Image (cartoon, rainbow, N blue to C red):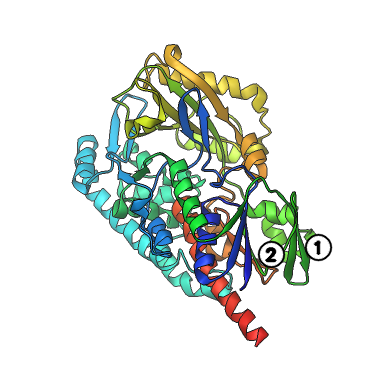
């Protein structure tokens, strides 16, 4: 039986391990943290529960597939509850826009804000669907390590105008500034600036429309526990609190791992982490070819994330499960974060109130909150020991005067994560929230390959490789790993014959 080691127990790693096991591999996951889940960790503070990572479930069928590999039903282990609205946008003038639910509900909201955009939205959905059918249905689970694969897709990508940005795609169809903002923020969910991100990622809009938005009851941590249970039942070994220090190699083969728990060996290795960390730290430059060295040196990173967690000793029943709180500036704010890499005084926020759907996240009569602000990654040189308290105070002030009145008097157990935590805890280079940015020149073949450029038995899953960040992206990357692992096993069988 071929042996495989999966380095990193995030969602891409867990999905890869399950798919390898279903192929017949003897699989072991090694994880740096104390629990599986990668960014999907869980914090407990003073009776409040906080998911640290992704809070939105889209494309639920990707998780259904993992349980079905072993003859099980996902719904028997974790409930995905549909949300309505999917997101509530709150604008600086106090107006709101509820996005999600049925198409008719969304159209009614658009008509309230700007009737001429109703037809434009229908055209936007059609455009997004065309990209979705090519970029997600057809290509998301296909390997892109051969340039000929990319060449074959160039005519289709050109026809879909993948050279345009998401912002350009949206503004071709919608006229009102509020709606332009609301329907162009999706790249931020995968680490990209809407003004730079290729319109390939416009497929996210139709993905949401096709399958809806769900919340895993019990939180993302409960989903991790359900997957860990499946991993255990499948006979996959898990080693937590295990750090990889170096990958040993000979020629085009990885021959073993140097870890905090001693050497480890396998036939096939899957790296589910930041590819920049892999190529900059775990492998010597002398082992890399020109393409790997170039990507490791010149790739543009996603932004950083500041996440503020807290409870409240009163309830806020009028606040949606997910709120996008938009500041006065949009394009200029993003330019400060992505291009100038400075920490501005203003911000836009993503606010998660899980107690809107699952009261178990807080004591009775209390709420649990998670507030995320895009910020520069560590390349901006921000001293978070100085700036974190200031940013925290500004965010609390802003929420107290708008969405969460009286917050200053009822906030409980606040704590935060900064890009420094992402660097330390997740080994994300420069504390980037989503590895490399989703630019056209960093997508498909141009992204880090799922089959390592310089090694025959090293595969990559996760946000920094194809098809990209976000739960649908990283779980889909495991399907690419499955295809490549099947080819690897077939080749090994032929060589041993």
Apparent side of residue 369 relative to residue 415 in the rendered image (left or right): left
What residue occupies the far right of the structure in this picture?
A: 286
Instruction: Name the residue carrying label 1.
Output: 286
Which class describes the residues within 10 Å of circle 1: few (<14), some (14-19), or many (20+)? few
Where residue 178 sits: x, y (%)?
33, 36
Where residue 479 sits: x, y (%)?
48, 65
The secondary element bearing badge 1 is classed as: helix
Chain-order first, disc 2 or disc 1:
1
What residue occupies the far top of the structure in this picture?
A: 409
Instruction: Name the residue carrying label 2.
Output: 291
Apparent side of residue 444 relative to residue 176 in the rendered image (left or right): right
Q: Residue at x 35, y 40 (%)?
A: 182
Of 233 and 166, nearer the camera is 233
Of 188 and 14, nearer the camera is 14
Q: Is residue 76 above or below residue 20?
A: above
Does the rendering let one see residue 382? yes
Quarter of the image for residue 398 reads top left
Does the rendering let one see residue 161? no
Quadrant assignment for the C terminus? bottom right
Q: Residue at x 58, y 80 (%)?
A: 490
């Amino acid at each position: 039986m071929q042996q495989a080691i999966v380095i990193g127990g995030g969602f891409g790693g867990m999905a890869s391990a399950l798919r390898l096991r279903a192929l017949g591999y003897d699989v072991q996951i090694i994880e740096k943290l104390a629990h599986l889940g990668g960014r999907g960790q869980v914090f407990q503070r003073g009776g409040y529960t906080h998911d640290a990572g992704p809070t939105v479930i889209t494309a639920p069928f990707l998780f259904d597939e993992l349980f079905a590999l072993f003859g099980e039903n996902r719904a028997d282990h974790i409930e995905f509850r549909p949300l309505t609205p999917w997101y509530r946008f709150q604008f600086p003038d106090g107006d709101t826009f509820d996005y999600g639910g049925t198409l008719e509900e969304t159209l009614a909201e658009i008509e309230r804000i700007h009737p001429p955009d109703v037809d434009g939205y229908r055209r936007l959905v059609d455009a997004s669907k065309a990209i979705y059918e090519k970029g997600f249905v057809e290509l998301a689970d296909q390997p892109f390590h051969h340039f000929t694969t990319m060449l074959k897709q160039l005519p289709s990508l050109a026809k879909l105008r993948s050279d345009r940005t998401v912002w350009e795609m949206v503004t071709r169809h919608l006229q009102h500034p509020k709606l332009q903002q609301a329907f162009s923020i999706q790249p931020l969910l995968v680490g990209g600036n809407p003004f730079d991100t290729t319109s390939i990622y416009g497929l996210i809009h139709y993905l949401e429309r096709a399958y809806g938005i769900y919340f895993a009851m019990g939180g993302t941590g409960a989903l991790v526990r359900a997957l860990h249970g499946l991993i255990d039942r499948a006979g996959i070994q898990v080693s937590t609190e295990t750090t990889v220090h170096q990958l040993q190699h000979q020629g085009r083969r990885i021959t073993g791992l140097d870890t905090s728990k001693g050497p480890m060996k396998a036939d096939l290795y899957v790296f589910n982490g930041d590819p920049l960390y892999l190529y900059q730290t775990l492998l010597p430059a002398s082992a890399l070819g020109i393409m790997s060295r170039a990507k490791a040196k010149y790739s543009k990173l996603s932004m950083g994330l500041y996440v503020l967690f807290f409870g409240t000793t009163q309830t806020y029943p009028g606040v949606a499960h997910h709120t996008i709180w938009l500041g006065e500036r949009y394009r200029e704010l993003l330019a400060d974060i992505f291009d100038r890499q400075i920490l501005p005084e203003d911000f836009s926020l993503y606010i998660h109130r899980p107690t809107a759907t699952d009261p178990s996240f807080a004591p009775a009569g209390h709420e649990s909150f998670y507030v995320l602000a895009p910020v520069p990654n560590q390349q901006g040189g921000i001293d978070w020991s100085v700036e974190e308290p200031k940013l925290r105070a500004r965010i609390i002030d802003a929420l107290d005067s708008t969405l969460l009145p009286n917050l200053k008097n009822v906030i409980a157990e606040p704590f935060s994560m900064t890009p420094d935590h992402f660097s330390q805890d997740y080994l994300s280079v420069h504390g980037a929230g989503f590895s490399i940015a989703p630019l056209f020149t960093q997508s498909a073949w141009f992204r880090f390959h799922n089959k390592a450029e310089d090694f025959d038995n090293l595969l990559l899953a996760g946000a920094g490789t194809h098809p990209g960040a976000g739960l649908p992206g990283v779980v889909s990357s495991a399907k690419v790993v499955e295809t490549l692992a099947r080819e690897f096993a077939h080749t090994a069988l032929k060589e041993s014959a």
